[in-house]
Each structure stands twice: as structure tokens, then as C-alpha cells.
Amino acid sequence: MRGSAVLVAAGAALLLTACASGGAAPDAGELTVFAAASLTETFTELGERFEAEHPGVAVRFNFGASSDLAQQIASGAPADVFAAASEATMKTVTDAGAAAGTPTVFATNVLRIATAPGNPKGIATFADLARPDLKVVVCAPQVPCGATAEKIEEATGVMLSPVSEEPDVKSALGKVTSGDADAGLVFVTDVTDVTGAGADVQGVPFPEAAQAVTDYPIVVLEDAPQAGLAAEFQDLVTGERGREALSAAGFGTP
């Protein structure tokens, strides 16, 4: 009996030693990134690259309206990285003391008119969106794409009467692709073949969009559970490979 007890104790000691030396698999790293809806396709691609270069790490995205995500973070939602579609929404996070450092602007974007393929309503200018025969959708004013649209309205004096104000840019785009709206104000990246709806919509540029360029900032969060991985992901986004992916998607450089 005594010999058996010694063997059991020795086996337990070996197991503990193996665990201490890394014999047991570590907890899988999970990086949580909150990002603006307009970044969905590009960040998904960058997330896949990050996972390939970090075996065992899973990148989990929460895409949505920047204003909603910022409020979630300020209220304590656990996350590692926040990438916003405007500096105003990022300010909600920094004012709450939830940012670990100074946000870095990594891309810019401008609005574009989205129409059905072939532009059947003949929309050519921003002023055309005020035509009474058109059903136009925009983003809600607290959302970056909505706030940007309001800036253009103020700059041009053209006031729109949208049939709906959508919670994020993807919802506004969806109203056009479904046929529920004749036109929508979305970001240029949402109507590209690379990241946007591609053949499902047609993008109509308008010069007034240059009067309201939107900056995209990114930051590692103060209480990031994976601070090291978060910093590496931010470096990927702001580095050369991130810039290439963002440029291919239609984003501008800061």
C-alpha cells in the first residue's frame, strides 16, 4: 500500500510539473475587436491574417454603429480594441477613460450615393436627393455616416427628407439593395466591388462629399484582457499591410 501511495504521489508531482512547464495547453487567446460597420469586410480579412500568424488566437469582431459601440465600451463592455468611424464617437471612449493611449487615425472615408444598378432614377447630384419623387435613406444623426450627411446638408443648404434614418451604414445600404429605397447615403467603401455591395448597387460620386471627410481612429482599450495582442492588431491595421488592405477597399489615407 505504501508503495502504491508513493507512485500516486510521484505521478501527481509529474503532472503538476508538466502543467507548470507548459505541458498543458494554455487558454486559447481571444482578441475582441469592436469596429465600425463600414470596416466589416476589411477587418474580417485582417483578422484572418492575424489568426494565421498567431496560432491558437481567435479574433472576435463586434461590428456596428460606432456610437453604439462607444457607449457599450464606456459602460464597461469587455473589449481589447476599438476602431471608430469618427473622432467624435472615439471621444466618448477617451472621455470615459477607457482608452489605453492616444487614438491613431488610420484611414479616411467619404460619402457616396448608392442607387440600384443602372441608376434608374437618374440621380446625378447631391441636390437630386431632395427630389420629392425619390425615396431616400440616410443614417441616424448620431451615427458617423449620418453626422457626415448632416455636415454636407449644412454646407450645401440642401435639406433632405429621408423615408428612414438607419442605425448604421450597412442598414442604409440594405434598404437600397432590397429596393425599399431609391437611393441612400453610404460610404464610398460600401459601394466598391472589393468590400461593398458590388454589382447589387451603383455608386454615384458627388463633389460635396469632400467637404465632410470622416477620420477613422483606432485604440487599444484600457482594460483590454489581451493588451499585448491588441497592440499587435493595432500595428497590423496601421502598418503597411493594413494600409494596403484599406486602400484596396477604397479607404483614404490620413
Image (cartoon, helix red, strand yellow):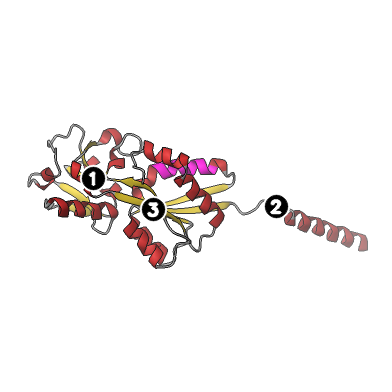
Q: Earlier in the sequence, mark 3 or mark 2?
A: 2
Task: Tell me the residue that label 2 is attached to.
Answer: 24
Task: Tell me the residue that label 1 is attached to.
Answer: 210
Q: Earlier in the sequence, mark 2 or mark 1?
A: 2
Residue depicted at x 19% and y 53%: 164
Q: Is residue 71 visible in the rendered structure shown here? A: no
Q: Residues within 10 Å of mark 2 (few under 14, many from 20)?
A: few
Residue depicted at x 81% and y 55%: 14
Does residue 190 appear left or right of residue 40 in this picture?
left
Of marks 2 and 1, the one in the foreground = 1
Coordinates of residue 44 in the picture (x, y in percent): 43, 43
Coordinates of residue 16 in the picture (x, y in percent): 77, 58
In the image, is residue 119 above or below residue 21? above
Does residue 1 appear left or right of residue 233 in this picture?
right
Q: The N terminus lies in which quarter of the figure?
A: bottom right
Q: Is residue 83 visible in the rendered structure shown here? A: yes
Indicate yes or no whether the magenta region holds residue 136: no
Coordinates of residue 5 in the picture (x, y in percent): 88, 62
Q: Which residues are magenta?
A: 42-51
Of marks 3 and 2, the one in the foreground = 3
Task: Tell me the residue that label 3 is attached to.
Answer: 217
**Picture disc at residue 95:** none
Could you tell me the amino acid type at mark 1?
A: Ala
Could you tell me the amino acid type at mark 3?
A: Pro
Q: Earlier in the sequence, mark 1 or mark 3?
A: 1
Q: CA distance from mark 2 to mark 1?
A: 55 Å
Callout 1 secondary element:
helix
Could you tell me the amino acid type at mark 2?
A: Ala
Q: Residues within 10 Å of mark 3 (few under 14, many from 20)?
A: many
Residue depicted at x 14% and y 34%: 120
